[in-house]
Amino acid sequence: MQSSGGHDGALGLPGRDATGAALLRWEAWQTLRLALPLVVAQLAFIAIGATDMIMIGWLGPDQLAAGAIGNNIFFPSYLFCMGVIVAVAPIVAQALGARRFRAVRRTVRQGFWVAIALGLTFTVILCQGEAILLLLGQQQATAAGAGSYMRAAVGGFSFSLGFVVLRSLLTAHSRPRAVVVAGIGGALLNLAGNSLLMFGSFGLPALGIVGAGLSTAFANTAMFFGLLIFVLRDRRFRRYAILARFWRADWPRFFEILRIGFPIGLAILAESALFASAGIMMGWIGTAELAAHAIALQCSAVAFMLPLGIAQAATVRVGYATGAGRLDEVGRAGWVALAIGAGFSCLSAGAFVLVPEALADLFLDLTRADSRAVLALAVSYLGIAALFQIMDGAQVVAAGALRGLKDTRVPSLIAVIGYWPVGFVAAYLLAFHGGLEGTGIWLGLASGLTVVASLLLRRFHSRSRVLHASVPAPAGAS
């Protein structure tokens, strides 16, 4: 039962009698309270990939190029599957807003089913990574190194998707702290594993790039089981009995997750595949350009975790308001999240402009003569990346807010059109017909992000206004 004043403690919603300024402050606090732990969790998660790329870079530019091109296949595959599974979050959030608690249990169970199906499918595909890269015109040595990295890392792929299911459950309940602990633990395990397996510490054989893949697989597996143990033992979550009668199918809920999640996965894949294709095109230009692109892309990926955490909070906040029938509050939840996301994006853009050399230095051994050319290129690419940080943040938060409404099909279409007919075509033309090479590729990426962000913002504005207008006027209003 909703309270008439203050806020609803169960749903994290303000009271109907709160003033406009108080509502904004309340929404900002609720969003930040949920988003900041999610940002930390996302940073911990991306630290696994960033640590791999940094430490692979110490092996030399050739190994860094192989790791980067392998990651250009592995990471988009993961992001697509993750996108499908994050549909669990808005479904659970709306169920909680409507106080339909049995629907929570059903959704999580079928989320695991989807994770298993996708995990097994993509494990088979990723084991053929070397052959895929050779078909895409990559050099034999680069494709072989990338393939060995993917075959080692894929052992934890299905577990990483199961982790997303559990993360969605905790996020929808505004309980992300365990996700933070698991993420930080996974990042530390990966760092230790890389030290042991890549460089042969404590008498172990030095496995190089394969060691990086193995430690990533172990870290993802440990993160899943750590979070699963928490959910099964925590008083608030064990009542759902998420593993009880696990074998029982619930096909309507299974296909609801796919129906909502597939467009999300497609939209994320459209963006990640654009960046992966940029890596492929960089490989056509040269090894130094590809290594520099890997550095700039990894820095951008880390920065992207900030608005991504805000986007996950936006999904929950909008989903709560929608499920509780408080449609006049949907717009406020979304726009507050967008404002916070823009602030985070400005911080990362400033870092790219002010200290690009320091960021690039993390990935390179500057005592090597071949690292100097990579450094200069990476600095130039980071300068362009700074230009689209705000647009990249805006598009992901707007997409998150729309997911809270279970609005995924049109945003998916917007992403595909903006990233490919606009972003990819612009990148290719500027790089290979405009003579700008790597710089042209990054300018093309910026153009695609700008188009997608503009259209998603417009759609959320339109949807939130329609919902607000559908709310009946208070009794006695003129």
Image: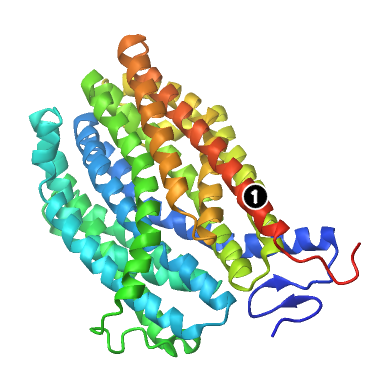
Give the amino acid type for the residue marked by disc 1 in the picture: Ile
Residue drawn at 44 percent across, 38 percent down: 300
- Of 70 and 313, nearer the camera is 313
User: Is residue 225 visible to the viewer in this orientation of the structure?
Assistant: no
- Of 436 and 472, nearer the camera is 472
Q: Is residue 206 above or below residue 106?
A: above
Residue drawn at 33 percent across, 49 percent down: 49
Q: Secondary structure at mark 1?
A: helix
Q: Quadrant of the C terminus?
A: bottom right
Residue 178: image location, x then y, percent:
46, 72
| Mark 1: few/some/many CA within 10 Å (<14, 14-19, 20+) | many
The colour scheme used to paint the residues is: rainbow
Question: Residue beneath label 1, please?
Answer: 340
Q: Quadrant of the N terminus?
A: bottom right
Q: How many numbered marks have been drawn onto this rendered protein structure?
A: 1
Residue drawn at 59 percent across, 42 percent down: 457
Residue 240: image location, x then y, percent:
42, 87
Is 33 left or right of 152, judged from the image as shown? Answer: right
- Of 201 and 172, nearer the camera is 172
Q: Is residue 47 above or below residue 313?
A: above
Q: Quadrant of residue 271?
A: top left
Residue 384: image location, x then y, percent:
48, 25
User: Is residue 144 visible to the viewer in this orientation of the structure?
Assistant: yes
Q: Is residue 320 above or below residue 369?
A: below
